[in-house]
Amino acid sequence: MTAIAMKQLLLPALLSVCGTLSAAPAVDLEAAFLTPAHAAKPRTYWFHMSGNISQPGITADLEAMKAVGLGGTLFMNVSVAMPTDLVARKDFMSPAWQECFQHMLNESARLGLDFGSALCDGWGNAGGPAIPPELAMQQLTWSEVRVRGGETVVPAKLPQPATLLDHYREIAVLAFPTPPGDLAAAPPALEKIRLAYPAAGTADLRFDFITPTTASEFTLSAIAGQHPFGNPLARIEASDDGATWREVRKFPTSW
């Protein structure tokens, strides 16, 4: 009797639930798209470059975002080689910068915008004065020396790879036979050529070879004052007679 009674009671209950679900109003997709709920609104990255921030500018930015229907921001403070002649520069975590940051929070709350922030200055995930270079993000660098079979190489004389923030730690010294495709005789490698970049115009670096030569690598780095988001400014050209030049490749030296 108990089992039969339960079956008789469950059927009306299930019918009641199904009836409730079918009675739910249909969603008007067009109306929801035109006036989306706050949770469905897009957010945007909000980069502040090289301390170029001011409280009036913050308010103007956020009010414009609100007006076009954005739901919030993800703030990132990035210090790069950019001019700061429009407003007084506010360095990261300085008192003036912190006042602007608090203003971002207040204005976001006033306008009903979500606010998120990166954990540190720059493109890293986390950092700051409390993070020494040896605990920060690492970059793997290397140098290369070619020797003939049977020669003795003193590890202390291996060229040190490039370093940043005066931090360097050796990981390993690897030796292996030269791959067959790299056995062709080549002129000695040129290292650490300093090229002065003029204030206006271009700077040229020319290599002359007696016979046709294959170049396998060219590294250009550490351009003082280089705008990190500039247009491509480096161009490799080749010539068979030293008079007529053809472009081989154009490449950016910026990000």
Image (spheres, rainbow, N blue to C red):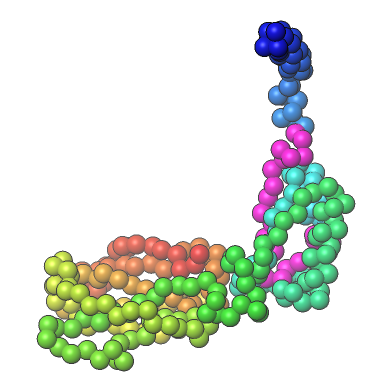
| In this rendering, position of residue 59 left or right of residue 178 | right
Toward the viewer: 82 or 154?
154
Residues in magenta? 36-58
| In this rendering, position of residue 216 left or right of residue 182 | right
Q: Within the magenta stretch, is there residue 243?
A: no
What is the number of callouts on the image? Answer: 0
Is residue 224 visible to the viewer in this orientation of the structure? no
Residue at screen point 30% across, 80% down: 173
Residue at screen point 85% across, 49% down: 111
Q: Give the quadrant of residue 234.
A: bottom left
| In this rendering, position of residue 58 left or right of residue 127 | right
**Placement of 76 over or under 176, stated as above or below:** above
Residue at screen point 74% across, 13% down: 13
Q: Give the quadrant of residue 79.
A: bottom right
Residue at screen point 34% across, 68% down: 236
Pick out the residue farthest to the left: 150
Percent x, y of residue 95? 81, 76
Q: Within the magenta stretch, is there residue 40?
A: yes
Percent x, y of residue 154? 25, 91
Toward the viewer: 47 or 137?
137
Pick out the residue farthest to the front: 1
Percent x, y of residue 132? 58, 80
Percent x, y of residue 189? 26, 81
**Placement of 122 over or under 197, stated as above or below:** above
